[in-house]
Amino acid sequence: MPPRKKNPVTFDEWLGKTIDDETNTRGGRVAVARWIGASPQSVNRRAQGKVPYLAREVEIIAGRIGIPTAELISRALRGYGGIEKLLTVYGVSEAEPTVEDNVTYIGHVHPEREAADDNPRKE
């Protein structure tokens, strides 16, 4: 008896299943590998959820199968259990600091000390 296919659990597994379902009649994983410039083994790992698809790869695949990228992701999210579950399980990372948040002042006068500087620097 052949082994039973494992039901997808993670979002990456659901995305792999969704892409497999959509590409089965268009050449399957071999075609996906050709479209995204990856080896068939690499696509197999992505389809199994072991390695995530890159955003650019998902865009390419969606374009090749003729559906918007957002629709492809939405189909995977529906199978997974929705965006709320995704955010709960994976969380949301903090925003990256901006340049303004993290730049040390460069110059001879520090803006916050300038008002208290009784002896200004001569150039």
Image (cartoon, grey):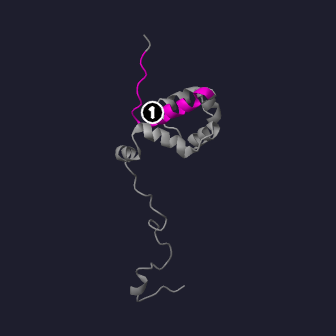
The N terminus appears in which quarter of the rendering? top left
Above or below residue 77? Residue 6 is above
- Residue identified by numbered label 1: 13
Q: Residue furthest bottom?
A: 118
Q: Residue at x 43, y 36 (%)?
A: 79
Q: Image check: 92 left or right of 42?
A: left
Magenta part, dominant SS: helix
Q: Residue at x 36, y 44 (%)?
A: 85
Location of residue 10 in the rendering, given as x and y in whole percent from the top left corner: 40, 35
Above or below residue 34? Residue 117 is below
Amino acid at circle 1: Glu
Q: Is residue 102 magenta?
A: no
Asked which secondary structure carries label 1, the reply is: helix
Q: Residue furthest left?
A: 88
Location of residue 68 in the rendering, given as x and y in whole percent from the top left corner: 58, 44
Give, as a single range, the part of the protein colored magenta: 3-25
**Residue 61's quadrant in the figure?**
top right
Q: Residue at x 45, y 79 (%)?
A: 111
**Residue 115's quadrant in the figure?**
bottom left
Q: Is residue 14 magenta?
A: yes
Between 38 and 57, the residue placed more toward the observer is: 57
Location of residue 102 in the rendering, given as x and y in whole percent from the top left corner: 44, 65
The C terminus appears in which quarter of the rendering? bottom right
Q: Residue at x 58, y 40 (%)?
A: 57
Report crowding for label 1: few under 14, some 14 to 19, many 20 or more residues within 10 A (C-alpha): many
Q: Image check: 97 left or right of 33?
A: left
Between 111 and 28, the residue placed more toward the observer is: 28
